[in-house]
Every structure is written in C-alpha cells, then in structure tokens.
C-alpha cells in the first residue's frame, strides 16, 4: 500500500532536489548544502520516509553489466480475476525487472532483461504459461530515450507553492 505525504513544503522540495543531485550525500552534507541543522535534515528525512516519498534505497544496476543486454517490454493481456495470482507468479520470474498495471486493451506492461533473443523467447514462453495469461506482445528496447526522473516534477511542485 502506498502512503503519500499530504503536502511537501519548500524545504522538503529543496531537500529532495539536493538528494536527487547527490543520492549518496550524508545528512551533514545535506545540512551544509541547504543551510539547515543536521537535526532538521534528519527529522525531515524521517518524515519523508514515513510519508512514503522514498520508493527504494536499492541502487539501480545495469542489467547489461550483469550479462543481460537484451531488454524488452511485454504487453500482457490477462484474465482480470486471476491478476493477484499472476502478479505472484510474475514476481518469481527473475528476468522481470518491472511490471505495471495499465488501463486500456493491455493489462500489464512487463519489462524484462535477457541474455540473448533465445533467452527472451524462453522468458516470454514462461510468462505465457502462467495460468490466466492470455497473450503477450513483445517490443525490444532499442535504447532509453529519457530515464526515470522526478527532478522536473520537483520543480513544478516548487513553482506551485
């Protein structure tokens, strides 16, 4: 279940922008950068964490560096009543990097990483074999045009204060 904070103020947004610029920054370094006390930064960080602002502390790693240079998006159509079980089964497939529920004709968008095209074919077959999955359509990733980012949203939020 996602928890979100009701409202971020200018200090929260400045703190998040500083963290976005340097995710490894210490509380002391953030305090110096923002001209705040260490205790204030620590308290804000704790409140932001409790509020569900931080999605993950996991480092983003290159699938290619791990030996999985082929990435693809699978558009997956499922029987809706079986979605909870399908979600559980998809989570067991190690090649699945992400999965998003969608509205519209496609039910799930699943991002996978594979060693080669045969591995991709086999991964797609494993996903198709999950009870309740009706069909998939695969699109190879040719390159990332815009990576995941929230900095522009932080600026919009700051402008709206």
Image: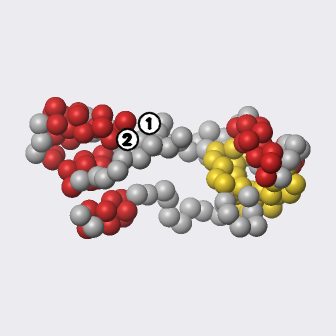
Dot 2 falls on a residue whose secondary structure is: loop
Q: Residues within 10 Å of mark 1 (few under 14, many from 20)?
A: few
The earlier-in-sequence mark between 2 and 1 is 2
Number of on-image labels: 2
Percent x, y of residue 148: 48, 56
Q: CA distance from mark 2 to mark 1?
A: 15 Å
User: Where, by quadrant of the figure, is residue 104 drawn?
Assistant: bottom right
User: Which quarter shows the C terminus?
Assistant: bottom left
- Which residue is drawn at the image coordinates 32% and 66% (left, top)? 156
* Residue bearing the label numbered 1: 57
Q: Nearer the viewer, residue 8 or 65?
A: 8
Left or right of 134, for residue 57:
left
| In this picture, residue 144 sits left or right of residue 35 | right
- Which callout, 2 or 1, points to the residue nearer the camera? 2
Quadrant of the image for the N terminus?
A: top right
Q: Secondary structure at mark 1?
A: loop
- Front-lying residue, 10 or 109: 10
Colouring style:
secondary structure
Q: Which mark is residue 155?
A: none
Residue at x-position 69% and y-position 56%: 109
User: Residue 129 location in percent, x, y?
Assistant: 89, 44
- Residue 85 lies left or right of residue 161; in this view the side is right
Q: Nearer the viewer, residue 140 or 160?
A: 160
Q: Which residue is mark 2?
A: 51
Please state if 117 lies on the left or on the right of 48 as rendered. Answer: right
Point out residue 17 in the picture as x, y percentages from the top left corner.
29, 53
Q: Residue at x 48, y 36 (%)?
A: 58
């Amino acid at each position: 279940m996602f928890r979100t904070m009701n409202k971020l103020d200018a200090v929260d947004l400045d703190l998040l922008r500083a963290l976005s610029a340097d995710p490894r920054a210490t509380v002391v370094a953030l305090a110096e950068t923002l001209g705040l006390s260490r205790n204030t930064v620590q308290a804000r960080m704790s409140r932001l964490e409790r509020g569900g602002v931080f999605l993950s502390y996991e480092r983003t790693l290159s699938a290619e560096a791990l030996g999985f240079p082929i990435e693809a998006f699978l558009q997956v159509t499922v029987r809706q009543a079986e979605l909870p079980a399908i979600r559980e089964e998809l989570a067991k497939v190690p090649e699945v990097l992400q999965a998003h529920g969608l509205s519209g004709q496609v039910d799930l968008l699943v991002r996978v990483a594979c060693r080669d095209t045969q591995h991709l074919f086999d991964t797609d077959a494993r996903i198709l074999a999950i009870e309740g999955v009706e069909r998939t359509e695969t699109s190879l990733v040719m390159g990332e045009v815009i990576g995941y980012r929230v900095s522009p949203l932080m600026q919009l939020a700051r402008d709206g204060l």
